[in-house]
Image (tube, rainbow, N blue to C red):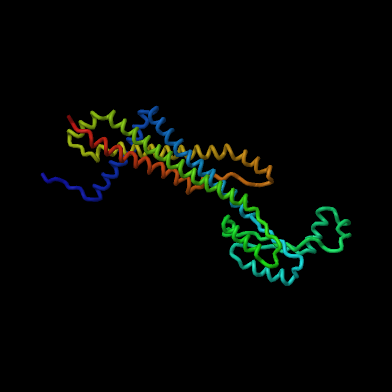
Amino acid sequence: MSRHKLSWPQRLAMYGVDHLRQLFGSLGELWRTPLSSLMTIAVLGVSLALPASFYVLLKNAETVSEVWQSKAQISLYLAQDTSESQAKELQEKLSKLPEIENLTYISAEQGLNDFKGAAGFAEALDLLADNPLPAVMILNLSEQGRAPDAAELLLADMNAEPKVDTARLDMAWLARLSGIVDLLRQAVMGMAVLLLAGVLLVVSNTLRLNILNSRYEIEVMKLVGATDRFIQRPFLYVGLWYGIIGGLLAWWLTLVMVFWLSHKVNALAALYQSDFDLVGLSLEESLLLILTGTLLSLLASGFSVHRHIKAIEPS
């Protein structure tokens, strides 16, 4: 009787079917130990949700920072003897600088007229023989010029201009804002590293306990000739499910946090006459969160399962 030999497509199909069977079988293993599984998934979800929430906070802080920094301006008060032609020449010179996005020129006469209309002192100002107000140039800084070092250097250059009497820029708030955002960025990175390390430890320890609880079954399987790779496979799929479900839980918790805070943020923004809206995770960031949880869980389960199953030998 001849032995039927399977072709490589048939072997590949059987290999895939076997993996699918063990994949969904491991999901049933989670269902058979609901309390332990829920505790592990909850810890994973919270551990992933915390850095994700801090990332959302950082992303919104950077958005607010960009809005505030976009309003960074240098005010140039020109000397009283500056003519219109000299002011125009200076305007053309400054408009070519990469640190300046755009500039606005306010002549002395226009400034006086605006002041009359705004202050209500038109009659008193008409009594003055000469216009006391200087011509002003307002420089709106570009993204390159908003950096504290670049803004400070530009401010020094403006003060060195012969026709500029005074150049002013509030450097303190710009430096503080940049420092706060940098500090928050470093804190988020440090918190993420610690919490993601916690994910590795939780998954690794949980699968270690699962393997120890199945020690006798593993010994029997090894006695009948099962390889370590075959025995490891269901435990690896359990780790995979931990990562997927934990990542989904983290995404949901982050979504709830953003929804819970959004109306508070909107109310605060309204006090500052702003239409700022709290921004959550994008689709790509959400998928990255779930993928990160899955990969970390697989990494931890791979290390733990390989180490502990290899150490079990039939007595």
Residue at screen point 38% across, 37% down: 242
**For residue 80, side relative to residue 255 (left or right):** right
Height in image: 250 above or below 170? above
Q: In the visual, does 158 lie left or right of 291?
A: right
Residue under the point 51% across and 39% down: 254
Rendered location of residue 31, percent (x, y): 37, 30
Figure label count: 0
Q: Which quadrant of the view contains residue 79?
A: bottom right
| Quarter containing the C terminus | top left
| Residue 51, percent from left and from top | 47, 41
Could you tell me which residue is drawn at 23 percent across and 37 percent down? Answer: 310
The residue furthest left is 1
Query: Where in the figure is residue 266, as x and y percent of width and height?
Result: 64, 42
Look at the image and tell me in which quarter the N terminus lies. Answer: top left
The picture quadrant where one finds residue 117 is bottom right
Image position of 215 (left or right of 83): left
Q: Tell which of 298 and 98 is nearer to you.
A: 98
Residue 295 location, x and y as percent? 38, 44
Is 204 displayed left or right of 265 in the figure?
left
